[in-house]
Amino acid sequence: MDIFTENFLYPEENKPLLQHFSSYFDAVYIGLIPFFKLNNAEVSSRSKASKKVLSLEEAQQQNPILNRLRPSKTRVIYANDESYPSDKEICHGGKPVTWKQILNKTSLADYKELNRALMTSVGALRQEFQTPKALQILKDYTEGEGIFHPTEGAFDVFTKQQIYKLLKKYDCSQIVVTDEFYDETKELDIVALDETSFINQIGFKHYYLYPQNKTILFTISWDYFFFFIAIDSCKINPNEIEANFEGFWAAAEDSHLWYRK
């Protein structure tokens, strides 16, 4: 299968990552979207997560289509929290906080448990996979320390900064960017863009990013706090990936569902 011509730049959830990307790449890195702090703003009254829970009545006020819904004790409705910092605020006053820093300061066991806690926070897991106790541990720490949770399903400011630097270092001048459904594809001349302009060109719905020579691919999907970096290790030094992005290399058996093992 040619993942580029067949528009298959994100794998099926059960398919091993290395197998899926093998026609172009020989290594896949599971990157983690960082937490962050703001250096220049009052944060105590601001939501530390990008999503908030709405009552049915609140949701219906925002979206009349939901008037058809009947009350349910098991339904949870999530919406964007307006008090969460904008990309501009994060870019100018933010400092990344790694997942490892969170693990070192809490009783959360590993990346898997931390990821499940984050996914629980935005309703991205079925009830049987949710981890409310882990989420409470995470919230107690981040709220006490003024640490904001990452957003899900999009490349964040810090990740886009590192992508820009890496592509510039490898002289990848023409960059292809496309959305989840391959409806909007554009090419960026990275030589003509400074870092801020590059960041602004990568929108919330841009899920796939790669240079024309296809030596590296950055790919993400909705509702998730991680992304994949697939590389041709003969042309992209794996050490550069580790130095610029928090995460780990996929083992032969790892799939999109690595966090369930």
Image: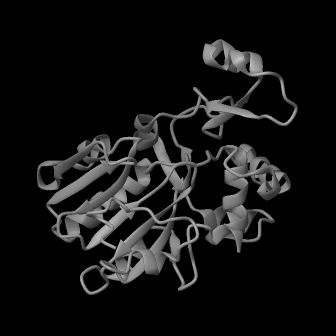
Query: In percent of the image, x 32 and y 45: which residue is there?
Result: 202
- 14 relative to 23, above or below: above
Query: In percent of the image, x 78 and y 58: which residue is there?
Result: 129
Res 148 → quadrant: top right
Residue 79 relative to residue 27: left or right: right
Query: In percent of the image, x 20 and y 57: which residue is there?
Result: 175
- Give coordinates of residue 37: x percent, y percent: 56, 47
Res 212 → quadrant: bottom left
Residue 62 relative to residue 96: left or right: right
- Give coordinates of residue 112: x percent, y percent: 68, 68
197 vs 59, nearest the viewer:
59
Residue 58 relative to residue 241: left or right: right
Query: In percent of the image, x 11 and y 49: which residue is there?
Result: 192
Residue 102 relative to residue 213: left or right: right
- Give coordinates of residue 208: x percent, y percent: 35, 56
In the picture, the quarter occupied by the C terminus is bottom right
Q: Is residue 210 visible?
A: yes
- Give coordinates of residue 98: x percent, y percent: 57, 62
How many discs mark residues in the rendered view?
Answer: 0
Give the colour scheme shown: one colour
Q: Is residue 244 visible?
A: no
251 vs 14, nearest the viewer:
14
- 223 relative to 71, above or below: below
In the picture, the quarter occupied by the N terminus is bottom left
- 59 relative to 207, above or below: above
